[in-house]
Amino acid sequence: MIWKGKNMFLSNETKGFLGTRNICLVIALSVMLLPPSGTTSLAMETENAQHYKMISSVEYTGEGQFRNQAETSYTVRQETLPNGRVQYSFYGNDGAPGSGQESSLRTFDFILDRETRQLSGVNRDMAFWARVNNECVRSLQKVTKNNVGKTWKQSFALSSFDTSLPGELAFTLTAIELETDQFGQMIAVRALSEPFLAKVEDGFVTCKVNTIYLFDPEIEEIYLSISTFAATTNANGHKETLRYEVATYRSNATGASVNLSGLGKDFEKFVQKVGLSTKVVKVTEEMPLPQWAQSEGLVAAQVATICGAMACEGAPNPVVTVCIPAAQTIGMQSTGLIPSMVGMGGAGTVAGTLGQTVPGIGTMKIAMAPAFLGLGLGTAGTVASGTAIAGGLGLVIENNSHGSGRSHRSPIVP
C-alpha cells in the first residue's frame, strides 16, 4: 500500500480544522516555552481550581516499532457565568517541580452550558472537539447516576462526521459503588465499546476503546480516568497495531496524587477489563507512525476517547475537563510536536506508573494482557528514550528516538 500524503477520507471541515490546528499549536507551544514575563503567575489555589496529572502512551508495531510516553500536569479553573453556564480555563503547569505555580499563559478555554451540556465559546482550533462533544450529548439516553449497580447500553451517532469514522459507536456500561478511606463513597463507571471500523485510504482498521471514570457520588468530581484504544489492520500487507493508553488522576498544586486507598478488589477487577497493558513495546527497529495512524487512526482514537467519557458521565457534568486534554495530548505525542531534549532510560507501562504514583493503586493488579481485540503489542522490554521537559506545558515526553531528538510529524494536530 502506498500512502499519498493526503487524508482523502476526511471531510473538508475536518481537514480545515487539522490544517489550522497545526499552525495554532506550534505558535502556542513556542509562546508557552518562553520565560515568564515580569507579571506574577496566576495562582490557582481557589475552590474553583482542579489540578490533574496525565500519563499517556502511544505504541505501534508493524514492520518497525514506535513508542512515546508522556506525563502532563495541568490545572482547570472554573468561573460561573449567568444562565447556568460555566467557563473552564486550562493552564499548563510551570516547569519547576513542585512549584504549584500556573503559567500566566492560557492553554485553551471553553464554556459549558450545564443545562444543555453543549460546549461553546471555543477558538477555531477547538471547534471540532466542541462539535464531537455536542453530537455525543444529543445521543445520550440514560443518566448514569440513576443506574448505579446496573449494566446498560449507549450508542453515539457519528454519521454527520467524515467518512473515515463509523456511523455509530456503541458501548456497554456498568456502574458500581465503592468506598475510599479518605473520600468515602465513590462511583466507578466503565464503558466497553463494541469493535468498530475506521476507513483508511486502502482499506479499514478495526478499533476498540475502553474507558473507566471514578467519580464522587454526585458525578460532579473526577478523581481518576483511564482510557485504552487499539486499532489493527492488514491493509499494508502485514499486521499493524496502534495503541493509546491515557490515565488522568486528581492531584494537588504540587503534583501529588489524591489518596485512593480503600478501593479494594472490586475496583481492581472492574478496571482490569479496560485492558491496560502489562508490557511495553520493545523497539528493535524504530520508525515514525505510518500515515494511517497519524491521520484516520488518530482521529478515531480522539473521537472515541471523548465518546467513552461522555458515555461514562451520562449527565451535564464536566468530563470534558479530562477527555479533551487527553485527545489533545495523544495528538501531540503522535505527531512529535515536542522533540526529545535529554536522553534518559525507558519508561514502564501506564499501569505501572499509576501504581507508583497513586496511593491505593500500587497494591492492585489493574493491568491485564492486551487481549482486547486479540491485539498483542510486542514483547516486554525497555526502550532507549529521549525526554523533553517543556516548562510552559509541564510536559515530559519520553520518545524512542535513541537520543536523536528526531520528531515525527503529521498533518493532524488535535
Image: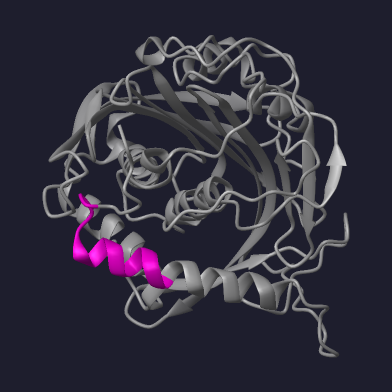
Q: Is residue 18 one of those drawn in magenta? A: yes
Name the one closer to the observer, 192 or 59: 59
Name the magenta segment's main secondary structure.
Answer: helix
In the image, which residues are magenta?
Answer: 8-20
In the rendered view, tell whether residue 320 sits above or below residue 127.
above
Q: Determine the residue positioned at 33% across, 42% down.
A: 3
Residue 190 x/y as whole percent: 40, 27
Q: Determine the residue positioned at 65% across, 61% down.
A: 75
Residue 114 visible here: no
Residue 164 x/y as whole percent: 21, 44
- Looking at the rendered image, the quarter that the N terminus falls into is top left
Name the one closer to the observer, 192 or 165: 165
In the rendered view, tell whether residue 239 sits above or below residue 88.
above
Name the one closer to the observer, 89 or 107: 107
Q: Is residue 362 left or right of residue 329?
A: right
Residue 197 x/y as whole percent: 22, 30
Q: Identify the image quadrant of residue 236.
A: top left
Name the one closer to the observer, 280 or 282: 282
Q: Identify the image quadrant of residue 223.
A: top right
Residue 101 x/y as whole percent: 81, 68
Q: Is residue 8 left or right of residue 23?
A: left
In the rendered view, tell whether residue 42 sits above or below residue 77.
below
Q: Is residue 244 left or right of residue 189?
A: right
